[in-house]
Amino acid sequence: MTWFAAVARLRARREPGVLVTVATVRGHAPRDAGAKLVVGRSGTWGSIGGGNVEAVVIDRARELIASSQREPELMDFALNDKVTGRHGVQCCGGAVSVLLEPLPVARAVAIFGVGHVGMELARILARQELDLHLVDSRADMLAQERLAALADAVAQVHVHHAPLLPEEVLAELPPGTHVLIMTHDHAEDAALCDAALRADHLGSIGLIGSAAKWARFRRRLATEGGHDEATIDRIKTPIGLAYVTGKEPATIAVSVAADLLRAFEREDA
């Protein structure tokens, strides 16, 4: 498997990894500058030459994975018989610098309801490095020509048409997915809120709507859903920045996206 195929595989499986590159070579070395190795939790793909250097780098890469470190790191190695490494001696006679670049798991966001606001929000979030799930019970909202605006997306876009039970899509979402509920139907929104509270693998849950809508939902979630107050409080509503009060779809979308990205930064702090 090529190194870029390995990176794609890790991303698809939502597994962290480290991309290792021979950055510089002085004198004789097992591989030239540019040679690459991908390290996952349990596997490796490619090679930077084997021996002590590769073994030490794999050990360090797995330490970075375990610590969730995001910053790249440069390691220098002298390849001579006077230097004994953790896994032995390499006496090629040269020296190499190796760059380790962590490949964190991309965040995932699911938008339930790709109407006016949902589509504007998708256009913004599609510019971010994340997995973006678009879910709607209406096929026309997910038509190829309508989603053409996302053709150059940075995000990996996943489309889910769920005409009968959109809430069943929740079970298919990867762990930690941030859910935003903004469908065209309040009954659909209510069912999604109930189902999201019963799912223990999700990240944050946001609901668009007025205070009156939320008051009705809150009573229903408690009386019919049997959820306690602490569980219901997992749902954030209203969503977006409180000081952005415009009601145009694009304005709401900017506000919601900014609030979500701010939450991501708090997670990383």
Image: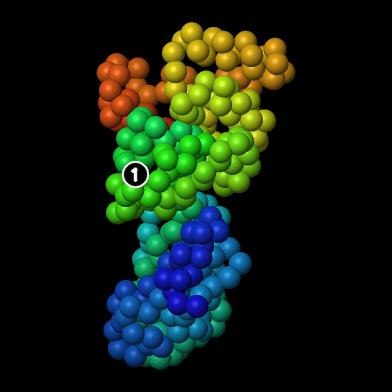
Tell me, what colour scheme is on the image? Answer: rainbow
Which residue is rendered at x = 47% and y = 41% of the image? 139
Spot occupied by residue 125 in the image (x, y as percentages of width and height)? 35, 41
Which residue is rendered at x = 62% and y = 10% of the image? 219
Spot occupied by residue 71 in the image (x, y as percentages of width and height)? 38, 54
Q: Is residue 105 above or below residue 171?
A: below
Spot occupied by residue 6 in the image (x, y as percentages of width and height)? 48, 70
Marks counted in the figure total: 1
The residue wearing badge 1 is 146
Q: Splitting the image into 4 quarters, where does residue 48 fall?
A: bottom left
Q: Is residue 236 above or below residue 87?
A: above
Q: At label 1, which amino acid type do we have? A: Arg
Which residue is rendered at x = 70% and y = 12% of the image? 223
Judge from the rendering whether residue 122 lies leftward or rightward of residue 267; answer left or right.
Answer: left
Which residue is rendered at x = 52% and y = 43% of the image? 161
Mark 1: few/some/many CA within 10 Å (<14, 14-19, 20+): few
| Helix, strand or loop under label 1 | loop
Q: Is residue 160 above or below residue 225?
A: below
Judge from the rendering whether residue 152 lies leftward or rightward of residue 178; answer left or right.
Answer: left
Is residue 204 at all visible to an observer of this figure? yes
Spot occupied by residue 75 in the image (x, y as percentages of width and height)? 39, 69
